[in-house]
């Protein structure tokens, strides 16, 4: 787990606290996106599978690069990601309920 030190990030890159929050949320959102991609792995074929695998590889490389550049400047990023994934899972459950209602109505 990477820990966040706001003073390090602000001093190193001279960014505002608002920008720091935006970066943390963007990176957490990206990590959630990457996790969703992983859940779809194996569901494609042919050209789509090739492009999908490239996307996953690129996402992994981006995350690795971000982690290198951020060092220990992310305060409990995993906690933010966990909360975002909880929201995504809640939305998924609601979508599944709505789809089931639609199927039951037919």
Image (cartoon, grey):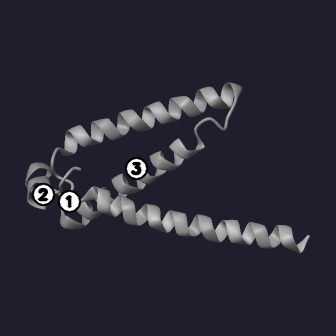
Compared across the picture, whether 31 is left or right of 56 comes to: left
Label 3: which residue?
31
Residues under labels 3 and 2: Cα distance?
A: 19 Å
Alpha-carbon span between mark 1 and mark 3? 15 Å
Q: Is residue 58 above or below residue 10?
A: above
Is residue 22 visible in this depiction of the protein?
Answer: no
Q: Nearer the viewer, residue 18 or 28?
A: 28
Q: Is residue 105 above or below residue 8?
A: below
Q: Earlier in the sequence, mark 1 or mark 2?
A: 2
Camera sees residue 35 = yes
Task: Mark 2: give few (<14), some (14-19) or many (20+) Cα within 10 Å.
Answer: some
- Residue 31 locus on image (x, y percent): 40, 50
The residue that disc 1 covers is 75
* 19 and 65: which is toward the camera: 65
Residue in the image at 30% along x and 56% along y: 78
28 to 97, vertically: above or below: above
Q: Which residue is mark 2?
A: 5
* Residue drawn where x is 61% and y is 26% of the image: 50
Is there a contact, CB below 8 Å, between mark 1 and mark 2? Answer: yes
Element type where label 1 sits in the image: loop
Residue 30 lies, in percent from the top left, at 41, 50
| Towards the viewer: 23 or 60 | 60
**Alpha carbon separation for disc pair 1 and 2:** 6 Å
């Amino acid at each position: 787990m990477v820990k966040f030190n706001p003073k390090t990030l602000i001093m190193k890159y001279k960014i505002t606290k608002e920008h720091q929050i935006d970066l943390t949320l963007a990176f957490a959102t990206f990590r959630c996106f990457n996790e969703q991609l992983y859940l779809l792995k194996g569901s494609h074929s042919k050209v789509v599978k090739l492009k999908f695998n490239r996307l996953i590889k690129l996402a992994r490389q981006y995350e690795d690069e971000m982690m290198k550049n951020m060092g220990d400047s992310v305060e409990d990023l995993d906690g933010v990601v966990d909360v975002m994934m909880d929201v995504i899972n809640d939305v998924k459950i609601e979508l599944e309920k709505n789809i089931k209602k639609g199927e039951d109505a037919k």
